[in-house]
Amino acid sequence: ALTYWDIGNIPITTTEAPDMTLGTYTTQILNLGLDELLDEKAYFFIEWAEKIDFILPNNVIWVYIRNNEINNSREIAFQA
């Protein structure tokens, strides 16, 4: 499912990557229209994006959020 947000003039879309274990991931991706959405000038956030990294553009910025159980906090890292 896709969720659309509009914050100011910045369109944002969020979704979760299709379940690759079903063996029909290419069909699922095409049905969602991810290839078209990724061409838009908008921010697009995908949970579990590593499942579909083969269709992502080269200018992806990866965001990693990890729990740090030692000090009960979260760590956020960015990778271009």
Image: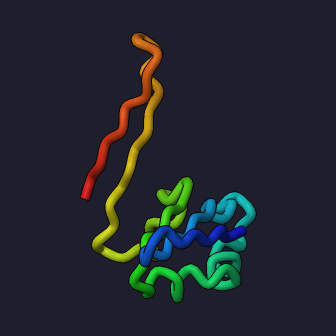
Residue name at image x 32 percent, y 61 percent? 61
Position of residue 21 measured from the top left corner of the image (x, y, whole percent): 69, 58
Is 36 situated left or right of 30 in this image? left
Residue with the most extreme top position: 70
Taking the spot 37% from the left edge, 31% from the top edge, the residue there is: 75
Please, is residue 79 above or below residue 10 in the view?
above
Closer-to-camera residue (50/8): 8
Which residue is painted at 43% across and 22% down in the image?
73
Residue at the extreme front of the image, as rendered = 8
The reply, left or right, for residue 75 in relation to residue 28 is left
Quadrant assignment for the C terminus: bottom left
Residue 15 at x, y percent in the picture = 61, 64
The residue positioned 65% from the left and 62% from the top of the image is 20
Write down the quadrant of residue 64 in the picture. Answer: top left
The image shows a total of numbered marks equal to 0
Observer-nearest residue: 25 or 3?
3
Where residue 13 sits, quadrant-wise, is bottom right
Residue 48 screen position, x and y as percent:
55, 54
- Above or below residue 31? Residue 70 is above
Left or right of 72, for residue 29:
right
- As drawn, 65 above or below 5: above
| Colour style of the rendered protein structure | rainbow
Quadrant that contains the N terminus: bottom right
